[in-house]
Image (spheres, grey):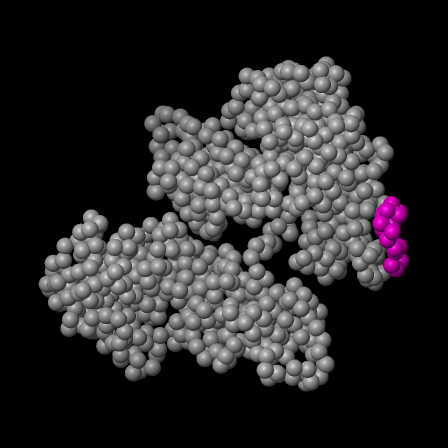
Amino acid sequence: MIELAELLTSTGGELFGPLFAQRFSSFSYDSRLLAALPEARAGQPAPIFVAVKTEKGDGHDFVLDAVARGASGVLCQRPIDLSGYGVTCVVVPDTRLALTSYARHVFGRPALTSVCITGSAGKTTAKELIAAVLDRGPQRVFRNRGSINGRYGMSIAAGEMKPDDRLAVLELAADSYDEIRDLAELTRPSVGVVTSIGEAHLATFGSLAVIAREKGRLLEALPSDGLAVLNGDDPQTVALADRTSATVVTVGENLAADLRACNVTVSTQGVAFDVVDNGFSARVPRAGLSLPPMIVASLLGRHHVPLLLAAVATAAWFGVPPGDTVAALADVEPLPGHLRPLPARHYALILDDTVNASPAAVSAALDVLGLFGNRPRIAVLGDMWDLGYREVDAHRRAGEEAARVADWLVVKGQRAQQIAVGALEAGMARARVFQAFTDADVLRHLDGLLASLAAQDAAVQSGGRRPHPPVVLVKGDRPARMERIVAGLMATPQYAADFLVRQSPGWLQVQPLLQDRPTWVDIDLEAVAGNVRAALEIIGPDVALCAVLKADGYGHGAVGVSRTALNNGAQMLAVACLAEAVTLRRAGIDAPILVLGYTPAWQARDTLRYDVTATVYDMDVARAFSQAAADLHHPARVHVKVDTGMGRLGLLPQQALNFVRQLDQLPGVVVEGIFSHFSVADSDHPAHQAHNAAQLAAFEAVLAELRAAGLLPRLVHMANSAATLSMQTSHFNMVRLGVALYGLQPSTAVPLPPAFRPALSWKTQIAQVKTLPPGAPVSYGNTFHTERETRLAVIPVGYADGFRRAPQHWGQVLVRGRWAPIVGRVTMDQTMLDVTDIPGVRQGDEVVLIGRQGELELTSDQVAERLGTISYEVVSQILARVPRVV
């Protein structure tokens, strides 16, 4: 609860305009959250919206939205007339500093005692356990909700405290240096708890030693008459004992722990153990009579033992009766996203552990999955973030552990592909590992797997035996958004908001920006999945689909596209050269891959080593493959290419029969397929239509000769995207889907059906906005001069990114839902826009180079027309330094 008088006094803020509300329920930092707040109802204090300027936006842009959603006050850095809305406006020089000043005032109340918890894992659970036992005492207890636990978040949390709160149980987190020090200075703890030191935020801190140093800042802030509670099972944590002058106690199963758990029982129902005073009462004499003999809790996993003991130690320090401690801990249920059991479809059980993920937390969660040894166990694991140089190793170790306890493994995300690698290397069967990049692919696979297991279980039950429905562990770091998988699996998804993490309107609407540059490409792999399924509907069940992935998947990222295409029905992949195939193999993709282009004889061995199929049309190359097959004891699979009128690679039709006969005699060579390629399948010009018919007839004649000779290969393919959509007679038994796979139309003459949609959008951000006088030159060569006072915006994208300079450039892009013309020459890394007629443009605003913004859309076809080329070239020339964000 925030009293206006206290806010003004503590921050030095000034009222602007009339005084309306004088009491506020809390601080709101996101206008989208206000719609869900019950305080906004009439008669109750409502939040005060804090307009904070961050690295990615300015809260002042959302003041009126906050007011419309029920905010009764605004804390801002510039005067805003809100008198017409009946809203109190408080102006301060810096809203962040104002929040900190207010929090310092609140935490400095003489009657308030703070208990602070930090660590690499287990902080939130420890906070709730400690708050639960202290709730049994006579004093009012406050705890910071959710993960509002950093420098900014703790100040927000202070706004929710009430004047009669006497104990504050606070979770402290850090993703930057000195953050724990600053939080401890702000909150003034009397009791400090360190849960563990582990591999979290390694990209920031670099090593466990530095992480330990930062976490130890909490202990340094404790008074000499305070208490430090350390996880005695973690040597890194125990080593922090000399960082404080407070009384130190260790808790855990370790024989040397001051408060020790013995006879620990861990099951699918929870954890239970005896509490042994192993020196605790000697260190904390006043607490000796306040120790319970035994703890039973419904929390899953052995890793909860030291957290429960930390709550026991804190309760004893504050004199909570042992019986109350036992009852309080027994009543604590698993928190949302913290190994919380939930019923799933097909009678399965979900273990929802989606709040975040570190290597230690993943290991603990897999140990819990292992407890369900009599049931089918499925591990669904997403990316772990911020691991720095340990990223690949940590993910592979997770895969090795998953192989130990899980019957099936499903991974989602770029980083998580290494989990699959680790599991496969540890001996998990390939058929038991499913790799994906999209929520929808994961859910489709799980739905089929769970349905199959449910059918097997039903058969078991009908035979009079006890059924064993499967258990599905779902875990991943915050950016992986694995709670979406849980929502899709729930038996009662309508209650997701009550049971899952990150269900607020803000989280549901926003995908965090995770790119490495302020210029990036968004890839919608679910669009790729839909395009594959739409193509399969067109070609029917008797025709295979080969996904063409040349040029890094036409600029979309070949690894993610290939995995998605295969997950949705593609049976083969095609690339331009061996190097592209090797990239896919090294990413763990084991589907058949055809190299469509030239493979020289000297690459024959590598082609076979990577189990890749080559295109052949030359006997010397074919002999090299035969020799490689003999040398490596590996069959050389090849497809024969026939040039029926493209004038590019391939045999002439009259050469094909004799060539295939010779191939048939080469030891080790397996002629798996034969194909040709249309040159004008995307045209409706009568002459081109006639040429298409002639090409098709020539190819069919070759096939007839081969069939008569008993040499027709198993796979026959000719149709590219255009022919797939418009020439059913060219489908044979496989089609090659290229540009249509990415939601791009082959041409205006062959448009895409409505079910297809583009998968790529290209975006950047405004880097600077400035005003130039009339006559000012812009960019190299002074080819453009302003004709009026001009608002100029600079965007960090140029021809080194694939944003064309000459002979034509893009012409215009989208800013704030309006067209912004390019002025001056496009440079290597930057481009200038005229935004004079677009109000409010500022640094950080999103700019769309390809895609939709508001009501307008700039498509790759429109860009291609402007550049005098085709959409294929536009997207495939977006260079590798532009990060792809899935």
Quick check: is 239 in the magenta stretch? no
697 lies left or right of 278: left
Residue drawn at 42 percent across, 30 percent down:
375
Above or below, 681 against 69 in this view is below
Q: Does residue 365 sit above or below 258 in this rendering?
A: below
- Residue found 46% across the figure and 71% down from its top: 874
Q: Position of residue 6 (x, y in %)?
A: 87, 45
What are the residue bounds of the magenta stretch? Answer: 5-23
Q: Is residue 709 left or right of residue 10?
A: left
Residue 796 lies, with reference to residue 116, above or below; the image says below
Camera-side residue: 394 or 20? 394
Front residue of 47 and 498? 47
Q: Nearer the viewer, residue 175 or 750?
A: 175
**Residue 316 in view, yes or no:** yes
Q: Quadrant of residue 826?
A: bottom right
The image quarter containing residue 357 is: top right
- Quarter containing the N terminus: top right
Q: Which percent across, then down, holds residue 677?
A: 28, 70
- Determine if residue 135 is in view: no
Looking at the image, which residue is at 23% across and 77% down? 694
